[in-house]
Image (spheres, rainbow, N blue to C red):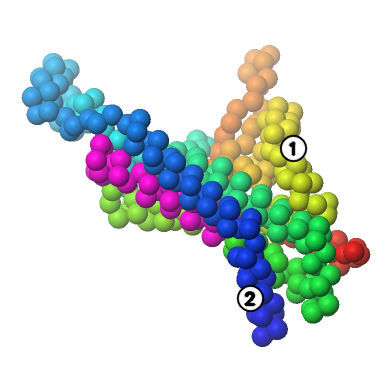
C-alpha cells in the first residue's frame, strides 16, 4: 500500500509539473473571468420595479379576477429585468427551491434540470478538460518514452496504470471544478452592481457547489475515457481526433439513425448528470397510418451518472487489458 501511495504521489507531482496542466488551469479560470467581464459590459443597469408601475400593473389586472399571488408574479416579472445571480443555475425566483420540484413517481415527462449559465458552460468545460488532460497525460508517456522508465521502477503494470487513471481523474476534476467556480464568482460583480442577488438562498448555494462538483466528476470520467483511447492509439493527437470525431459525427448518427442508443451515450449521460436533468429516450408510436418518434423519460440524473461511470470503467478495463498485453516500446 505504501508503495502504491508513493507511486500515486509521484504521478500527481508529475501531473502538476506538466505545462499542459498549468495551461489548462489558466484557461479554465480565464474562461470564467472572460464570461464575467463580457456579462458585466453587455448588461444594462436596470433598477428595481417602481412602486407606481407595479401598482398600475395591479390595477390593469384587477378586471381579470386573478388571485393576489398571480397578480404579484405577473407584475413583478413584467417589471424586473435585472441580471439575477440565480441565472447561473436557471430561471430566477424569489425562492430558489421552487425550481427544484420533487420527482413524481411513474412520470413520463422528463425533468430538464438546471438550464442556467453554469451547467451549459460547465458541460463544455468538462469535455474540454477531460478530453485534453486524459489524451495528453497518456499520449505524452508514449511520445517521450517515460512509461518505460516508470516500469523500471515499478514493474507491476496494473499499479502503474491505476495510479495514472486516478491522477487523470483527480487532475481533470480539479481543473474543471476550479473553472466552474471561477465562472460563478466572476458573475457576482454584475449581480451586485447592475442586477440583484434575490433568490440566492441556502438551496442555491448547495446547488452551486454540487453542480461544480458534478462538473468535476464528469470531467474526470471523460478524462479516463480519453486516456484509454490514447493508450489504444499511443498518441495524443489520435485520441483527441477520435473524441472530436465521435462528438461531431457520432452524435449526429445517434440522433438520426440509431436513436435507441442515446440513453447509453457517455457524453449525453455526463451532461445530464452535471445538470441534474433526466435522460430521455426515443420510442416509436403509431397513430393511424403514421409512425413517429416521441421523446420520453428514461433515467434520472443519478442513474445517468452511474451509466457514465460504468462506461468509463469499461474503457478502463480495456485499457488494463491492452496495457498488460502490448509492448510499451
Q: Which of marks 2 and 1 is in front?
A: 2
Magenta run includes residue 310:
no
- The residue to which callout 2 is attached is 9
Q: Distance between the residues labelled 2 and 1?
A: 34 Å
Q: In this view, does 324 lie to the left or right of 43?
A: right
Question: Badge 2 local density, few (<14 within 10 Å), some, or many (20+)?
Answer: some
Quarter of the view holding residue 223: bottom right
Q: Which of marks 2 and 1 is nearer the N terminus?
A: 2
Q: Can residue 61 be seen in this view?
A: yes
Q: In this view, does 102 lie to the left or right of 60?
A: right
Magenta segment, which residues? 172-199
Q: Looking at the picture, tell me which residue is in the foreground, 211 or 9.
A: 9
Q: Is residue 272 visible?
A: no
Residue 6, above or below 174? below
Q: Looking at the picture, tell me which residue is in the foreground, 26 or 47.
A: 26
Q: Residue 234, image x and y in percent?
A: 83, 55
Q: Is residue 206 left or right of residue 60?
A: right
Q: Residue 290, image x and y in percent?
A: 67, 15
Q: Which residue is drawn at 57% across and 34% down?
A: 296
SS for tag 1? helix
- The residue to which callout 1 is attached is 245
**In which quadrant is the C terminus drawn?**
bottom right
Q: Residue at x 25, y 44 (%)?
A: 192
Q: Residue 143, image x and y in percent?
A: 81, 57
Magenta run includes residue 183:
yes
* Residue 315: image tag: none
Amino acid at each position: 500500500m505504501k508503495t502504491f501511495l508513493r507511486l500515486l504521489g509521484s504521478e500527481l507531482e508529475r501531473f502538476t509539473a506538466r505545462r499542459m496542466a498549468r495551461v489548462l488551469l489558466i484557461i479554465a479560470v480565464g474562461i470564467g473571468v472572460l464570461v464575467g467581464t463580457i456579462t458585466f459590459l453587455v448588461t444594462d443597469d436596470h433598477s428595481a420595479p417602481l412602486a407606481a408601475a407595479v401598482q398600475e400593473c395591479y390595477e390593469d389586472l384587477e378586471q381579470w379576477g386573478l388571485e393576489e399571488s398571480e397578480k404579484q408574479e405577473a407584475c413583478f416579472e413584467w417589471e424586473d429585468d435585472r441580471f439575477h445571480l440565480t441565472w447561473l443555475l436557471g430561471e430566477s425566483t424569489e425562492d430558489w427551491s421552487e425550481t427544484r420540484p420533487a420527482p413524481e413517481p411513474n412520470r413520463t415527462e422528463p425533468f430538464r434540470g438546471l438550464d442556467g449559465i453554469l451547467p451549459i458552460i460547465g458541460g463544455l468545460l468538462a469535455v474540454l478538460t477531460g478530453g485534453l488532460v486524459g489524451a495528453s497525460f497518456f499520449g505524452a508517456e508514449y511520445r517521450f518514452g517515460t512509461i518505460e522508465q516508470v516500469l523500471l521502477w515499478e514493474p507491476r503494470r496494473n499499479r502503474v496504470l491505476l495510479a495514472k487513471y486516478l491522477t487523470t481523474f483527480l487532475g481533470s476534476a480539479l481543473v474543471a471544478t476550479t473553472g466552474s467556480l471561477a465562472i460563478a464568482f466572476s458573475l457576482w460583480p454584475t449581480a451586485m452592481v447592475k442586477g440583484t442577488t434575490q433568490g440566492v438562498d441556502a438551496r442555491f448555494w448547495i446547488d452551486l457547489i454540487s453542480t461544480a462538483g458534478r462538473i468535476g466528476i464528469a470531467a474526470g470520467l471523460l478524462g479516463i475515457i480519453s486516456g484509454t483511447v490514447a493508450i489504444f492509439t499511443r498518441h495524443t493527437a489520435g485520441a483527441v481526433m477520435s473524441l472530436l470525431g465521435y462528438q461531431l459525427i457520432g452524435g449526429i448518427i445517434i440522433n438520426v439513425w440509431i436513436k435507441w442508443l442515446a440513453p447509453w451515450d457517455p457524453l449525453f449521460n455526463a451532461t445530464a448528470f452535471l445538470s441534474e436533468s433526466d435522460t430521455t429516450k426515443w420510442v416509436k408510436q403509431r397513430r393511424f397510418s403514421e409512425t413517429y418518434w416521441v421523446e420520453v423519460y428514461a433515467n434520472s440524473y443519478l442513474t445517468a451518472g452511474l451509466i457514465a461511470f460504468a462506461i468509463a470503467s469499461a474503457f478502463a478495463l480495456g485499457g488494463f487489458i491492452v496495457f498488460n498485453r502490448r509492448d510499451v516500446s
